[in-house]
Image (cartoon, grey):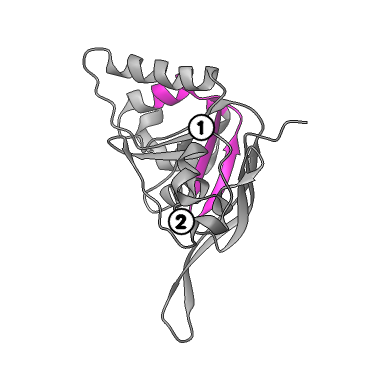
């Protein structure tokens, strides 16, 4: 039986303030599975934990608890120089996020993949001129057709951002204060009260 393309299993990341009597300042919690190739839309307010979630999925940030399994492989146990063969994080202008190395490579597992399985696009810039948006949407669709999982995270400030999400995405995640809400369609997503409050006049 094939492993799910991505399993986020009891994942938690906590940040603390102070050295003595530490107090938790932020916590991200996530627990979900994506069985097959898909394009997943991600939204949420600034500071809600979206980038932290992407960093945890790619292994560039260490979890406080839980696991991220990409085709059954725990990405936090894979060699740092091979993690981008499982999941890769493109930040804004398509720059690739880098890893912090915490253990020697010989103590870690091999990726078992030559090309990234999960592609995470973190608030990419969409140029509205000369068909660029169509080019990028075709690129996302091609990744999916090749058996990849695509996450597209946008912070909508123009209506066309919502149109992109509606057109290209098959399921959705809304992140707020470190908690995830899942929706199976754009209509289900925009029916959620926190999402409606977040998008405001863009839905009118």
Rendered residue at 46%/40% (across/down): 84
In the rendered image, the residue lying farthest to the right is 1
Q: Could you tell me residue 23's position as x and y percent?
A: 48, 77
Upstream in the sequence, badge 1 or badge 2?
2
Which of 117 and 169 lies nearest the eye of the viewer? 117
Rendered residue at 56%/26% (across/down): 38
Mark 1 residue crowding within 10 angstroms, few (<14) / some (14–19) / many (20+)? few
Q: Which mark is residue 103?
A: none
Mark 2 residue crowding within 10 angstroms, few (<14) / some (14–19) / many (20+)? some
Magenta stretch containing residue 180, yes or no?
A: yes
Rendered residue at 55%/49% (across/down): 78
In the rendered image, the residue lying farthest to the left is 129
Q: Could you tell me residue 92's position as x and y percent?
A: 30, 38
- Circles 1 and 2: CB distance less than 8 Å? no
Q: Could you tell me residue 151's position as x and y percent?
A: 48, 34
Which of 98 and 89 lies nearest the eye of the viewer? 98
Magenta stretch containing residue 173, yes or no?
A: yes
In the rendered image, the residue lying farthest to the bottom is 20
Residue denoted by label 1: 114
Estimate the spatial distance between the alpha carbons at disc 1 and disc 2, rounded to whole Å: 22 Å
Tell me which segment is drawn in magenta: 162-187
Q: In this view, does 131 lie above or below 22?
A: above
The reply, left or right, for residue 172 in relation to residue 156 is: right
Element at label 1 = loop
Which quadrant of the rendered structure holds the N terminus?
top right
Q: In this view, does 157 lie above or below 139?
A: below
Number of callouts: 2
Element at label 2 = loop
Closer to the eye: label 1 or 2: 1
Residue denoted by label 2: 61
Q: Could you tell me residue 47's position as x and y percent?
A: 38, 54
């Amino acid at each position: 039986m094939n492993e799910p393309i991505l399993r986020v299993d009891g994942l938690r990341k906590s940040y603390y303030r102070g050295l003595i009597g530490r107090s938790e300042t932020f916590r991200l919690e996530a627990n979900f599975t994506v069985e097959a190739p898909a394009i997943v839309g991600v939204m949420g307010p600034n500071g809600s934990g979206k980038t932290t979630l992407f960093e945890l999925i790619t292994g560039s940030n260490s979890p406080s608890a839980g696991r991220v399994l990409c085709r059954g492989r725990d990405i936090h146990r894979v060699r740092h120089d091979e993690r981008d063969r499982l999941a890769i994080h493109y930040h804004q202008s398509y720059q690739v996020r880098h890893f912090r190395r915490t253990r020697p490579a010989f103590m870690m597992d091999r990726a078992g993949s030559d090309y990234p399985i999960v592609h995470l696009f973190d608030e990419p810039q969409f140029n509205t001129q000369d068909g660029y948006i169509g080019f990028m949407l075709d690129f996302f669709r091609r990744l999916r057709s090749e058996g990849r999982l695509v996450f597209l995270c946008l912070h909508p400030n123009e209506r066309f951002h919502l149109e992109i999400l509606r057109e290209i995405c098959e399921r959705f995640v809304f992140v707020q204060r470190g908690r995830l809400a899942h929706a199976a369609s754009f209509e289900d997503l925009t029916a959620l009260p926190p999402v409606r409050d977040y998008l405001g006049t863009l839905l009118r």
